[in-house]
Image: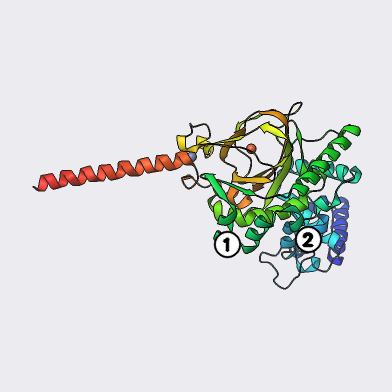
Amino acid sequence: MTREERLGEKRGEEESRRRRSSTPPEEDPLGDDNDNEALLVASVENERRLARRLRLSPNPEHVPESYEGMRQQLEFHPSVFRALERHLPTCMLRVPRDAKLDFMRKVLFRYLPNGDFARVQKMKEYREKILQHYQPLHKELYVMHPTAFFVPSFLKAIQENTLESFGAILTEPSPGIYTFDMLQPRFCNLLLAEVENFEKWVHRNKFRIMRPNTMNKYGVVLDDFGLEVMLDKLMDDFVCPLSKVFFHEVGGSTLDSHHGFVVEYGQDRDVDLGFHVDDSEVTLNVCLGKQFSGGDLFFRGIRCDNHVNSEPYPEEIYDYPHIPGQAVLHRGRHRHGAKATTSGHRVNMLLWCRSSVFRELKKYQKDFSSWCGKCLREKQQRQRELVAARRMEFMRETESVV
Ligand SMILES: [Fe+2]
Ligand SMILES: [Zn+2]
């Protein structure tokens, strides 16, 4: 507590004591003095409040602390705390990191509705409980090792980061759907083994886990048992370079959070997956294995909220057969589902990448013709009608002149 705070509190206590023991204001001969003191207390309180208010503009000279190592314990992304630290009042800049963190948390929580706050807290406790007790099988998976994770062609294309290098690895079998070789077989096997190990631990300990989404009853959330930091890196360094180029109009260049999970299909697991859109701007879907038949992904065109149930156009119909190690990248609003896995066991890793900027801007937009197939058709139809009407008008004017 700062000296100003202690002073303010002491004066406040004295003030309330005085008020409790004093005569009523209308009979108090010292009323003016009391008013002055009340004003003084109010001004000290105000000064204290101002001194602890965030700066409107960031402090360019301040070098923020790193919060990366605390990722699992934080309710918000470490980059939020790093950015917010530059806005701290001067009196807060030299206090220990924990005190800064405490202050920033209080500021951030003020912006969360009560329901969200409870949800964030609950999720934090849920993950802490898992992390305290679960022993990872392959620790090497938890830190990004690009050369061990990715096939050389994918790595080279991302490192070169040009349209030509992406063109060399990607195929676009249907508009807006990109496929490419991505994961090394060894990485797929290690991740499959890690997931199996986690599931065994869950079963042994009768731990109730949250499933990846409302549609998949089998599968696990990778972020919940320690893979969040690695998957963040996967999004930032390996998905963003592609989504910036190919999905710019749906927030592909401003991806800032993810939901990473695996889904499992086959006997005694989910068989198929109904027609839906993802809660993502960009989805990365990679098949990890194992042996299976069936399970094709069926795509049926990209739609905005208003047109999500409209019929697909013939050119939007496309079925994609899974190949282990191969990735599919598509917009979250690209309607799709999974056909039945008819034999064997299929496991896919999904990374739903989200952009808070895009989601905020979308609230104020009405025209989604840059990505919704139906909006685009309707816009083109309106333009055709307008041109036809103008042509008719012009013809009538010409006839009347003749
Ligand atoms: Fe999906
Ligand atoms: Zn639309």
Task: Tell me, yes or no, if residue 226 can be seen here.
Answer: yes
Q: Nearer the viewer, residue 102 or 350?
A: 350
From the top left corner, tell me how far across and down residue 46 is, in percent.
Answer: 75, 61
From the top left corner, tell me how far across and down residue 185 is, in percent.
Answer: 74, 47
From the top left corner, tell me how far across and down residue 390 is, in percent.
Answer: 25, 45
Q: Is residue 340 above or below residue 227?
A: above
Sequence-wise, the earlier of marks 2 and 1 is: 2
Query: Which residue lies under the disc numbered 1?
Result: 162
Q: Which of the 4 image quarters holds residue 28? A: bottom right
SS assignment at label 2:
helix
Left or right, residue 129 beside residue 269: right
Q: Is residue 103 above or below residue 377?
A: below
**Mark in the foreground, 2 or 1:** 1
Left or right, residue 357 beside residue 7: left
Residue at (26, 42) in percent of width and height: 389
Task: Tell me, yes or no, if residue 53 can be seen here.
Answer: no
Which residue is most to the bottom? 61
